[in-house]
Image: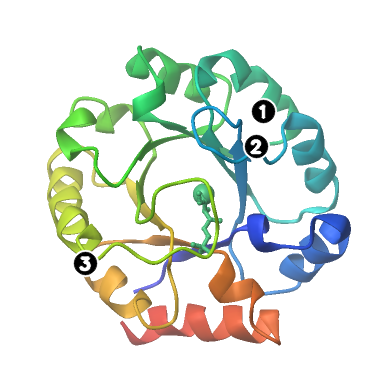
Amino acid sequence: MSFYLSPSLLSADFGELRRDTEMLNASAADWLHIDIMDGHFVPNITFGPPVTKAIKKHAKKPLDVHLMITQPERYLSAFKEAGADILSVHAEACTHLHRTLSEIRQLGMKAGVVLNPHTPLCQVEYVLEYCDLLLLMSVNPGFGGQKFIENTYRKLEEAAKLKARYNPNLIIEIDGGVNLDNTPKLLASGANALVAGAAVFAAEDVPAQIKTMKALGDKA
Ligand code: DX5
Ligand code: ZN
């Protein structure tokens, strides 16, 4: 089963973002996952639209932008201008989630909704037909290199049922602790997009690791 692999630049060398972006351009990666953290919705702070724009200048693959910020509706146009292709917002951070997802689409981006590990799927049941991607966090957001939370598989199976019911074109993406070991089971449970930070960037040969991970989809 083929899937989108979205290496997370959170684990890249921030002093060498151009080099790492070009390395991903030349790899089998499908998207570039860009983690935006505000020190409020999550404890960590990364970067915002200007650095995203700088990455976009060199990127040859779509930018899969994951907003871990409060009131993300304030920044939708800024991330469009910065070059986001997919823009995902946390359900927990949006008071008017339907409106925010609709605005992302109106701006010409694919709209994604994200759930923290503890947030039930019923929170998004009535917006799945208004978005393109459902991102399930399999760690608590904020940091790379954390341990995968095992009951994600159960949530993923339930999400696949909602996809069949409400939006068969929905992309279901998993983010956090994804590695070569859990990739086959995630794909078998219904994921068709995977984010990988540490598992990709800790490898000695990053493009080879990406190729190996992508090949797991061909076997699934
Ligand atoms: C975590 C971020 C992830 C992170 C994943 O808050 O949303 O995208 O980069 O990193 P790994 O794959 O190392 O868990
Ligand atoms: Zn992320």
Residue topped by disc 3: 189
Q: Position of residue 144 (x, y in %)?
A: 55, 59
Q: Secondary structure at mark 3?
A: loop
Q: Residue furthest front?
A: 43
Residue topped by disc 1: 79
- Residue nearest the observer in this picture, 213 or 152: 152
Mark 1 residue crowding within 10 angstroms, few (<14) / some (14–19) / many (20+): many
At label 2, the amino acid type is Ala
Q: Is residue 43 left or right of residue 96?
A: right
Residue topped by disc 2: 84
Please determine whether, in this image, residue 166 is positioned above or below residue 10: above
Q: Earlier in the sequence, mark 1 or mark 2?
A: 1
Q: How many marks?
A: 3
Residue drawn at x 64%, y 50% is 62
Residue drawn at x 19%, y 61% is 151
CA distance for labels 3 and 2: 28 Å
Residue drawn at x 57%, y 64% is 197
At label 3, the amino acid type is Ser
Q: Are marks 1 and 2 in contact (CB under 8 Å)?
A: yes
